[in-house]
Image (cartoon, rainbow, N blue to C red):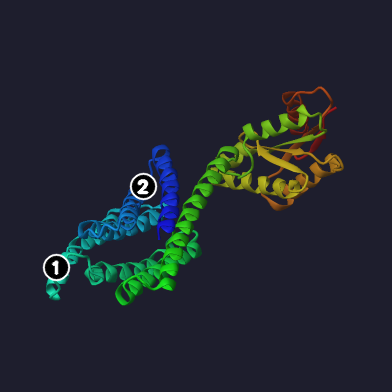
């Protein structure tokens, strides 16, 4: 029992550290709910650790532990819901009503022995039956309501299943065997440790998802989903710093302003997305694609075996055949000693030559 509580306290401390750090940096309601719930859970297991380490059968401590367990369970699930969903007034009212109901029925702990005719200074297992039944209702309710509304739904369902097994084992051991059945004790404590471990992995994976989303948004263009200018330039500079031969293909959509003026900006955005997707599909195994300016899509070809001129011509033909626009394309191949700006400038100059000599052409820098 003490080993299980020690492991759980360590897991909860790690989760609280992560949640508190996210709360301070992102100010999201989900992290506030998680931080409060984890604080309550830490308090609960600290009380349980103290009770069993010192054999302190104090009714008030046991009552406090039982109530903290239910409230923290509600807040944890509230936080999980908030990680993936905006919380409106009716959701707050629902979750806080559940907490209020737990507080209302919790004093039964002190009145049940009297109602049943027991006179004892020690806590009885039956005293917590109100919150125990309520906990079962919460588990079933969460299993039905929350999984369709969140990511990692299977992991969440597994965590609830483990919590249910833990809770059933705890009740059977307390009500039927006076906590002296070794097998049920093992199931109870292993189940609780596994539950909190899965809860930790749930929170950690959500943090990784957020970090990936933040990183992706920082290096990609929001409209076209290809790399933005800054990241494209950094990758090019990295290749040139190692004198790796690359080629730059610089494309510009012809008559783009006219398209926006006559058909609207939505048509212009769709054309940009289509051109970017075509370049992306062609470059998938040979390089990277970026949006360099308004209607300028660039590619860096890193495979020296690729014939750049034919590649650029294939791109131009596909744009003409598959979209409502055409592109003027220029390209340049790296020469030792060139800077990224010089290489991009040469590809841009070649594109400008294609643009000024009739458009819908491919030119190599000479």
Disc 2 secondary structure class: helix
Q: Nearer the viewer, residue 106 or 49?
A: 49
Q: Quadrant of the C terminus?
A: top right
Q: Which residue is mark 1?
A: 111
Q: Which residue is mark 2?
A: 35
Q: Quadrant of residue 221?
A: top right
Q: Nearer the viewer, residue 234 or 126?
A: 126
Residue that lies at the very extreme toward the front in this rendered image: 54
- On screen, residue 353 above or below 2: above
Spot occupied by residue 209 in the image (x, y as percentages of width and height): 53, 49
Q: Nearer the viewer, mark 1 or mark 2?
A: 1
- On screen, residue 47 above or below 190: above
Residue at 68 percent of width and 50 percent of height? 323
Residue at 42 percent of width and 71 percent of height? 182
Disc 1 secondary structure class: helix
Q: Quadrant of the N terminus?
A: bottom left
The Cα atoms of the two marked residues, 1 and 2, are separated by 32 Å
């Amino acid at each position: 029992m003490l080993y299980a509580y020690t492991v759980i306290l360590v897991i909860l401390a790690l989760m609280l550290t992560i949640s508190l750090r996210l709360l301070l940096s992102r100010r999201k309601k989900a992290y506030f709910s998680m931080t409060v719930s984890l604080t309550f859970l830490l308090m609960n297991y600290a009380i349980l650790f103290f009770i069993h380490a010192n054999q302190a059968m104090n009714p008030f401590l046991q009552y406090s532990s039982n109530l903290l367990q239910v409230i923290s369970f509600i807040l944890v699930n509230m936080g999980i819901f908030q990680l993936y969903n905006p919380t409106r007034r009716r959701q707050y009212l629902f979750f806080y009503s559940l907490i209020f109901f737990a507080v209302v029925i919790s004093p039964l702990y002190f009145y049940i022995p009297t109602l049943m005719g027991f006179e004892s200074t020690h806590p009885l297992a039956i005293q917590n039956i109100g919150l125990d039944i309520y906990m079962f209702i919460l588990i079933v309710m969460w299993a039905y309501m929350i999984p369709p509304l969140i990511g990692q739904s299977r992991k969440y369902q597994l965590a609830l299943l483990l919590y249910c097994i833990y809770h059933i084992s705890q009740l059977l051991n307390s009500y039927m065997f006076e906590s002296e059945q070794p097998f049920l004790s093992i199931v109870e404590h292993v189940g609780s440790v596994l539950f909190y471990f899965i809860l930790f992995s749930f929170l950690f994976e959500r943090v990784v998802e957020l970090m990936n989303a933040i990183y992706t948004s920082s290096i990609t263009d929001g409209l076209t989903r290809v790399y933005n200018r800054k990241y494209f330039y950094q990758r090019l500079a990295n290749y040139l710093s190692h004198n790796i031969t690359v080629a730059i293909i610089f494309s510009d959509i012809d008559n783009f302003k006219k398209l926006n003026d006559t058909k609207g900006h939505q048509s212009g955005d769709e054309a940009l997305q289509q051109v970017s997707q075509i370049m992306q599909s062609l470059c998938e195994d040979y390089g990277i694609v970026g949006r360099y300016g308004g209607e300028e899509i660039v590619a860096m070809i890193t495979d020296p075996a690729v014939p750049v001129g034919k590649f650029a011509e294939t791109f131009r033909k596909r744009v003409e055949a598959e979209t409502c626009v055409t592109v003027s394309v220029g390209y340049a191949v790296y020469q030792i000693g060139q800077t990224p700006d010089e290489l991009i400038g040469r590809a841009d100059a070649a594109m400008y030559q294609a643009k000024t000599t009739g458009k819908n052409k491919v030119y190599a820098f000479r």
